[in-house]
Image (cartoon, coloured by chain):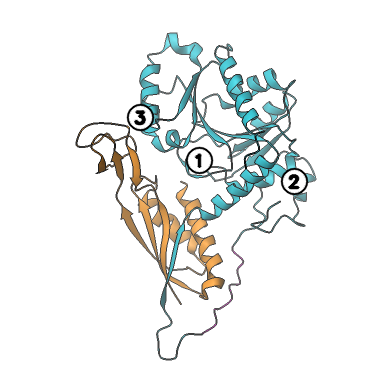
Chain colours: A cyan, B orange
Amino acid sequence: MCGICGCGEGHTHSHEEDHSHDSLDHDHHNPIDGHQHAAQHTHAQGLSPARMVQIEQDILAKNNAYADENRRYLSQRGILALNLVSSPGSGKTSLLTETIKRLKEELSIAVIEGDQQTTRDAERIRATGVPALQINTGKGCHLDAHRVGHAFEHLALSDHSLLFIENVGNLVCPSAFDLGEAHKVVILSVTEGEDKPIKYPDMFHAADLMILNKTDLLPYLDFNSAECIAYAKRVNPKIKVLSLSAKTGEGMDNWLKWLKAELELQRIDYA
Amino acid sequence: MHEMSLCENILQTLQQQANAQQYSKVKTIWLEIGELAGVEADALRFSFDSVMQDSIADQARLEIIDIAGQAYCSHCAKNVPIQQRYDACPECGHFPLQIVAGDQMRIKQLEVE
């Protein structure tokens, strides 16, 4: 499906498939081809060969092109893809397992897990009975649109399904990389401090929804929810906020309603 | 450290353009980096040299053009300078402001041969 990189046909993931489908930690087409062809020397004789070339291109143009292709693939199939971003330990995976338990009877769900190392999160997701693919980024601090596009091939996503992409726990780098998702959802646990939105403004600016998680702990903390939400809206006036506890289930109803409504929106065929 | 990824993206663009623009070596590269783009110039320079090593941009000079952050204040009905995404208007104190410049990161031009 990778029309941009041209690696869709015939490239092999067999080194992973030999043992399991749960890891995608290769980098099968390193763009450095090692044999750059010398340009034709077409410049006029006597002139210095050095010249200026105007590029005027976004540094992330290539990632954005992959993201556009992912978005097209997802929208043609009515799949709602959400890019879940947060610091490590905000409770992303617990929120996912609790969400899946409540929705898996009525919706088709799949998960892409991004971590630097281990397949632990994918195993936690698979224990709920839905397919999960682990992408290990190695030294990388974020998922990119190219790797996510290839993950689609492995997951055999159903039409009108829900795809959660759990990004690497990091409130900085994933903000810059569009994966082709419908929305970035930033998860902030109340144990982290209310000023995270202004400490990491890029992420809260890029997200459409903020989830305040672990609200069951509020009685034991000095966390000021109203102040936190005000900071988030200062960075991103359009951000919507949900408060919940994945552990006790408080507030989960609103999150499930939001998910179903967004999934329904994916069914609309715009002209 | 996504500056490393940014450099890898830059290198991909340089290689992609090499055929179209008929060059085999990049000598200088000018980037426009906005103050609000979340990019650390020092980290970018550090990554740049190692990512470009043994490529068509080996030893290339990196020139970073800083683009100041600017936002529109609806109260003052004009553009005002800002340093952070969450800054209030320096003149009237109103926020949020609408960012109009300084969040870009672009490859502007190259010196090639």
Kind of residue at badge 3:
Arg
Mark sitting earlier along the chain (3/2): 2
The local crowd at label 3, few if under 14, some if 14 to 19, many if 20 or more residues have their Cα within 10 Å, is many
At x 52%, y 62%, the residue is B13
Mark sitting earlier along the chain (3/1): 1
Q: Which residue is label 2 attached to?
A: A16
Image mark 1: chain: A
Q: Nearer the viewer, residue A136 or B39?
A: B39
Which quadrant of the figure contains the C terminus of chain A?
Answer: top right
Whole-angstrom CA distance, mark 3 to mark 2, is: 45 Å
**Number of the label disc, if any, that sits on residue A8:** none
Q: Which residue is label 3 attached to?
A: A234
Q: Which stretch did the figure color magenta?
A: A32-41
Residue B80 in the image: state x and y as whole percent: 25, 43
User: In this rendering, does residue A24 appear at all?
Assistant: no
Residue B94 in the image: state x and y as whole percent: 26, 31
Whole-angstrom CA distance, mark 3 to mark 1, is: 20 Å
The local crowd at label 1, few if under 14, some if 14 to 19, many if 20 or more residues have their Cα within 10 Å, is many
Q: Nearer the viewer, residue A269 or B20?
A: A269
